[in-house]
Image (tube, rainbow, N blue to C red):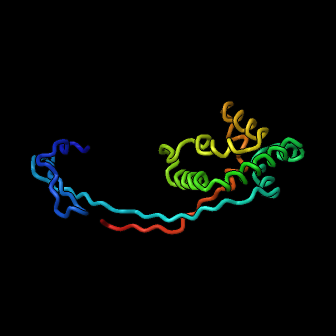
Amino acid sequence: MFPGHEHVLTPPRTQNRRSETLLARTSGKGEMVELVRKQFVVTLRFETTVEAITDQRVIQDLGIYANRDQIICWPGTWRKVERQRRLLAETLRHPDVLDSLLRRCVWDFVASALPEADGRLEEIVAPVIAGLEPEDRAFFQGAVEAGAFWENSEHVWERFEVRLMAAEIAKV
């Protein structure tokens, strides 16, 4: 608040119920000052896609690591990638989970500093993990329990993409 504007003398009165509320406040000199409050609606349209986990994209993703060449040559990397390909394939067979994940991607894109829209990633994909083959299921459940789910499934989530398609702003 600015000095001299601490007290509302009259309750807000609506001039136009849909768009404007006038507030009467005192100025530093004790005179009435009217402030206008307007509401706007912002509509955002997004397109979401899920890409395949290709060898080329995995190599590109690994480019952030200083020892990228060593990671690429390590057989465990490609076992991990194959496991993540199976997780992505199973995710695509669960439309409700897929929709939740895509909404989460949009939410993260728009408001990464706010609470998550649909829950933690591990919670969202729990039904998918439950449907995996026993070895994969045990691996991903272990990663969740160890707090390392993202690190063991990043190639899956890096394939989810959000693109802002249009934005409109209108006075209400």
Q: Position of residue 57 (x, y in %)?
A: 77, 57
Residue 115 vertical position relative to residue 88 in the rendered view, above or below = above
Q: How many marks?
A: 0
Q: Position of residue 103 (x, y in %)?
A: 54, 54
Residue 74 vertical position relative to residue 14 in the rendered view, above or below = above
Q: Is residue 97 left or right of residue 12?
A: right
Q: Is residue 76 left or right of residue 149?
A: right
Q: Position of residue 108 (x, y in %)?
A: 54, 50
Residue 172, picture quadrant: bottom left
The residue at the point 50 percent across, 69 percent down is 166
Residue 34, picture quadrant: bottom left
The residue at the point 20 percent across, 56 percent down is 35
Q: Is residue 154 left or right of residue 121?
A: right
Q: Is residue 70 left or right of residue 155?
A: right
Q: Nearer the viewer, residue 171 or 99?
A: 99
Residue 133 vertical position relative to residue 95 in the rendered view, above or below = above
The residue at the point 60 percent across, 51 percent down is 97
Q: Nearer the viewer, residue 50 or 31?
A: 50
Image quadrant for the N terminus? top left
Residue 52, picture quadrant: bottom right
Residue closest to the far left: 31
Q: Position of residue 86 (x, y in %)?
A: 76, 50
Q: Nearer the viewer, residue 78 or 164?
A: 78
Q: Nearer the viewer, residue 86 or 46?
A: 86
